Image: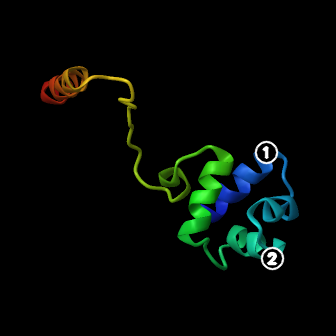
Amino acid sequence: MIADKIKLLREKRGYTQAELAKKLGITRSSVNAWEMGVSVPSTHYVVELSLLFNVSTDFLLDMPNSSSVSTEGLSSREIASVIEIIECFRERK
């Protein structure tokens, strides 16, 4: 649940609710409401939280685990090779 994730990440960083609120430009009561499950952050704040805590939005939203691989700096041919390798692993299952 996003409420639990926000509280866990905030406490892990050692932030108070007031400190997190200040970083996001919102009120402490908004953070408290998120953590209590009374309300949920808007899409904008889900993104801001993911950037602040260096986690994916999928993690915050409890979406199924998936992995991504950055292909930055690879040629089209290298990317095609990576995709081919992934497909080989999938076929083995």
Q: CA distance from mark 2 to mark 1?
A: 19 Å
Q: Image check: 38 left or right of 67?
A: right
State whether residue 31 appears in this view.
Answer: yes
Residue beneath disc 2: 29
Q: Between 57 and 1, which is closer to the camera in this rendering?
A: 57
23 lies left or right of 59: right
Q: Please tell me which residue lies in front, 24 or 61.
A: 24
Residue type at mark 1?
Arg
On screen, 89 above or below 46? above
In the rendered image, residue 15, in percent from the top left (x then y), is placed at 84, 52
Q: Nearer the viewer, residue 21 or 3?
A: 21
Picture quadrant where residue 41 is located: bottom right
For residue 88, side relative to residue 8 (left or right): left
Callouts 2 and 1 close, C-beta under 8 Å: no
Mark 2 burial class by Cα count in 10 Å: few <14, some 14-19, many 20+: few
Q: Residues within 10 Å of mark 1 (few under 14, many from 20)?
A: few
Task: Name the quadrant of the N terminus.
Answer: bottom right
Q: Secondary structure at mark 1?
A: helix
Report which residue position mark 1 lands on.
13
Q: Pick whichever, 54 or 9, lies toward us.
A: 54
Tag 2: residue type? Ser
Q: In which quadrant will I find the C terminus?
A: top left
Residue at horizontal 16%, vertical 29%? Answer: 87
What is the tally of numbered marks visible in this picture? 2
Measured from the top left, where is residue 63 in percent x and y? 43, 55
Is residue 1 visible from the viewing direction of this image?
Answer: no
The tag earlier along the polypeptide, 2 or 1, is 1
